[in-house]
Amino acid sequence: MTVTLAIIGAGARGASYARIAHEEGLAAVVAVADPDPARRAALAREFGIAEDRLFTDWRELTDRPRLADAVVIATPDRLHTEPALACADLGYHLLLEKPMAPTEAEARRIVEAAVRNDVLLAVCHVLRYTPYSLELKRLISQGRIGEIVSVEHLEPVGWWHQAHSYVRGQWAVEAESSSMLLAKSCHDIDWLGHLLGKPVAQVSSFGGLQHFRPENRPDGAGDRCVTCPVERTCAYSAVRIYERFLGDPVHEKWPLGVLTEDVSPEGLRRALAEGPYGVCVYSGRNDVVDHQVVNLLYEGGATASFTMTAFTALDFRKTRVFGTHGSLEGDGRTITLHDFLTDTVQTFDLDPDGGASAADGHGGADNALIRAFTAALRTGDRSLISSGPEETLASHLVVWAAERARREKSVVSVGE
């Protein structure tokens, strides 16, 4: 069986998933819907999509009889719900970019539509699918460290990645996308729940926007990096951040491909002079947090602490799991197991495929998800998808509870 895919949203994520499916021979990309004519045309050329299957709006696609086995929905966060509902009602299986939706009510509507129409819904919590995560979960499930008592987990967003996506980019303003915890770190809240295998009972959280504020603008700084007198001494200079990616075919797709279709020095300079990615990070447009901690109490008594911070190198997550008979420490590349009974240490090398950024497919996580999704469609084995509607809704509920706790400075019971 040849799996067929339609793409709704041909930006960086939608194009990346389509490319993986095509290049690995996992599926044929047969339709695309996107309002940007250049993006539509680029995918049409790359995948040989017929002219009558190129749509300017997802509604044009859903006005037609079903054209593919599944649809990849990679629209902006606040534009997930309506296409997901319409496609589910037409019988499309759904690969839905995270977060599922910015509100609980919308997320529940998507879950209900998938269940009602008996379609597969996989949310792109890609971290669950990597060999690293599978090995970590296996070691825990086998009882190698006994019962989990506590977990310490860090998401190092990366200083330039924060500036790119969450200060200058499309996730900079919560009202236009979602909170930082939902837009970025729903991966981590979901992944922690997946590891522990228990629901969260209570949550607290602290954090805020500390650095990327107008009052922290350097003396003499200009409004745009290309004309700023102090640009050479600023860690967040868009010129310095982006120029180093010129000539790199991987990073020319992301992040440079987000800025401009012309990834020449001249094209980049023009984008920085005219577009949002060349604006000073201290302009004050952004409002999502640049650091946050979340404390989680799971049913049964285990605890976890999660830290998200902008002020790091962009790297894989770092995790320490403390059990009654041993501990595990992982960095996305290797896992170290300390067995208390024998007082010995064992190391597992997982050798991820590439780096942690979206340019590298999150170290092979994107590829692993597409393999699992297309295999589930091909075989009918839905157990291959662990980030289904119920699991995703449960982890999203924790995120919304954590955001309430942060804003109210309180401890919130999940589901309250």
Image (cartoon, rainbow, N blue to C red):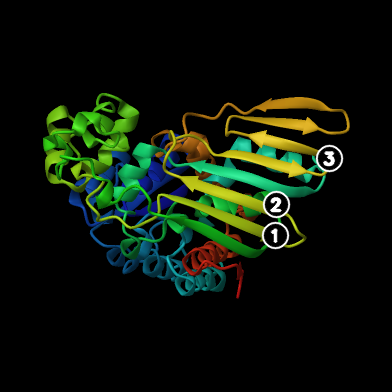
Residue 101 vertical position relative to residue 269 in the rendered view, above or below: below
**Badge 1 vs badge 2, beta-carbon distance below 8 Å:** yes
Task: Answer above or below: position of 52 versus 347.
Answer: below
Give the residue at x 35% y 61%: 174
> Does 130 sit above or below residue 10?
above
Q: Which mark is residue 325?
A: 3
Q: Is residue 263 above or below residue 121?
A: above
SS under mark 3: loop
- Give the farthest residue toward the right: 341
Q: Secondary structure at mark 2?
A: helix
Numbered disc total: 3
Q: Using the image as rendered, state which of residue 51 and residue 317 is in the foreground.
A: 317
Q: Quadrant of the C terminus?
A: bottom right
- Earlier in the chain: of badge 3 and badge 2, it is 2
Please state if 198 lies on the left or on the right of 225 as rendered: right
Mark 1 — residue? 298
Contact flag, marks 1 and 3 (Cβ < 8 Å): no
Q: Is residue 199 visible?
A: yes
Looking at the rendered structure, the secondary structure element under dot 1 is strand
Distance (Cα) linking label 3 and label 2: 16 Å
Residue sitting at 39 percent across and 61 percent down? 178
How far apart, in angstroms, are the residues tagged by discs 1 and 2? Answer: 8 Å
Q: Which residue is mark 2?
A: 196
